[in-house]
Amino acid sequence: MPGTEPAVRPLEGITVVALEQAVAAPFATRQLADLGARVVKVERVDGGDFARAYDAGIRGGLGTHFAWLNRSKESIAIDLKRDEGRAILARLIAGADVFLQNLAPGAAARMGLAASVLRADRPRLIVVDMSGYGSRGPYRDKRAYDMLVQAEAGLVSVTGTPETPVKAGSPLADIAAGVYAFSGVLAALVRRGTTGEGASIEVSMFDAVAEWMGQALYSTLYTGAPPPRSTLGHPVIAPYDAYPTADGVDVVIGVQNDRGWAALATGVLDRPDLVTDPDYATNQARVRNRAEVDALIARTTSRMGRADLLRRLDEAGVPSATLNDGHGLVAHPQLAERDRWREVGSPVGALRAILPPITFAGVEARMDPIPGLGDHTDAVLAELGYGDGEIARLREAGTVA
């Protein structure tokens, strides 16, 4: 209604201190910031989060990963090798609701930042430790990056061609861990609201990908045979693949059951005989005869333009999609029509960004600027009670930047 106050974002009033780098933890905290939490990002004085320099894909040299993961945060640069630096971090955590870290294995504990230590005097604090493989087990101290975890957890065994394993193009191990850390914090905040108790939470990239292996994991466990790599297709469903069109843009068709096959055969292929043909009538038969199924579909689709094929598939009720690339996503009408684009500030000027996927009715997601390294150091230190002279001395000594 015109004139009414804007709705409060769900996490306004929650303060998160994040000792984070790379992708997994920043993705978790950015989602918290999207919903209104204050996120204070603690960075190294010598370059900050190394994701700042993964690439220089945005004008002015800003890294694309960093731009994606760090809007709406405050950056404070501290040298945690110094006693005074660790004292600043301790003050920050003392006023926080959530402390989240994804340092190298054991590094947080060596700095006195173990969950048991932090929560001894602050039982309401929620501590999230993110790692590659968890705090116990033979892989506890093993370095973990997205590609390595995708390999270790078997994800690359189900992506690619029959001859060549391929990692997922997006950093799915990082994203999966970030999603679970985000939802773990939300669950812990709900519990704290009813019991007053904080939480000690662990999230590992390996566990997250093992969960996401889903059907492949259970197929291996109960049939004794891991599913084969099937490129874009599905190992146990057919037809489920990309098919050519007359204008050179592939269309993906996914038939989930025999009713869908009947709709495709009659409504698009004009082959009602295929509905009852024993070589094609059931999904198991189609999987056995996958090459023949794909060939007969391609013979029809290759004579049709993309728009005409998609129209006929939609009219027949057959699930389909265009095989888009990044350009197709940027120009996608579904994003434009639903007003999903916003501008956010950054050290190199205004940038386009899409809204986060969680949409609260009547609430605009927070889309504040991407911080430069240490942009908020002075303001945060002043808030913690440091005077101008102390701040200048800390900066001159290199304790903060």
Image (cartoon, helix red, strand yellow):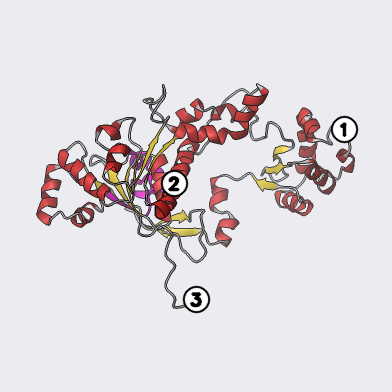
Residue located beneath label 2 in the image = 182
Q: Residue flagged by tag 3: what amino acid is it?
A: Met
Q: Nearer the viewer, mark 1 or mark 2?
A: 2
Q: Is residue 306 left or right of residue 51?
A: right
237 vs 161, nearest the viewer: 237
Circles 1, 2 touching at the beta carbon (< 8 Å): no
Q: Residue flagged by tag 1: what amino acid is it?
A: Pro
Magenta range is 50-75
Element on which disc 3 rests = loop
Q: Nearer the viewer, mark 3 or mark 2?
A: 2
Q: Position of residue 176 (x, y in %)?
A: 49, 40
Tell me if residue 307 comes above or below residue 238 in the rendering: below
313 vs 179, nearest the viewer: 179
Q: Position of residue 43 (x, y in %)?
A: 28, 43
Mark 3 residue crowding within 10 angstroms, few (<14) / some (14–19) / many (20+) = few
Residue located beneath label 3 in the image = 1
Q: Is residue 373 left or right of residue 146?
A: left
